[in-house]
Image (tube, rainbow, N blue to C red):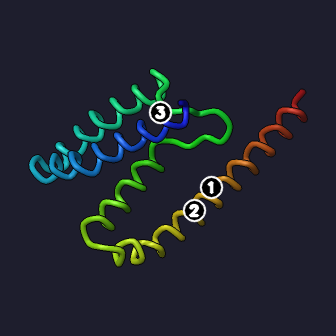
Amino acid sequence: MKHLGTILGTAIAGMFVMSVWGAFAGEYGIGGGWFAGFAIIGTMWFLNHFIGLVNNDGAFVDMAVGIGMAGTMRGVFEQGIEAGIASMPTLGVVLIGGVVGGFTAYKLECYLAEKEKAEA
């Protein structure tokens, strides 16, 4: 059941972001984009993390995965499989960025642990 909650929570966040955020930004400019970001992400974070719809045990996977998947699949459903194939270079760069960010976070944690150990 916890996995179903994670799938539903991130999918709902993705659907709201992909359908509402652009409309707000298009109609009201940057202020509308900020409002949509606050309203959508704030509400979905509350439901997913505070209420506990999303399971965060083990590896931390946040709403961005569901939002990214919803955006990718929306393009595939609207424009065909070519849109999914065209998004592969971007996906590759995002994955490389995730690996570099994870490695950097690991090295920072090691550094801070050594620094704390030396101070003690």
Residue at (49%, 36%) from the top-left corner?
4
Q: Are marks 1 and 3 in contact (CB under 8 Å)?
A: no
Mark 2: few/some/many CA within 10 Å (<14, 14-19, 20+): few
Q: CA distance from mark 3 to mark 2?
A: 27 Å
Q: Which mark is residue 101?
A: 1
- What amino acid is found at the position of numbered circle 3 in the picture? Gly
* Tag of residue 84: none
Is 40 on the left or on the right of 52, as rendered? left
Which residue, given by chain and number where applicable, does mark 3 sit on? Answer: 5
Using residue 3 as the reference point, say whether residue 64 is left or right of it.
left
Position of residue 75 measured from the top left corner of the image (x, y, whole percent): 30, 65
Q: Residues within 10 Å of mark 3 (few under 14, many from 20)?
A: some
Relative depth, front residue between 40 and 76: 76
Q: Are marks 1 and 2 in contact (CB under 8 Å)?
A: yes
The CA span between labels 1 and 2 is: 6 Å
Say if 55 sits above or below 102 in the image.
above
Q: Amino acid at mark 1?
A: Gly
Q: CA distance from mark 1 to mark 3?
A: 27 Å
Q: Earlier in the sequence, mark 1 or mark 3?
A: 3
Q: Residue furthest front?
A: 1
Q: Nearer the viewer, mark 3 or mark 2?
A: 3
The quarter of the picture where the C terminus appears is: top right
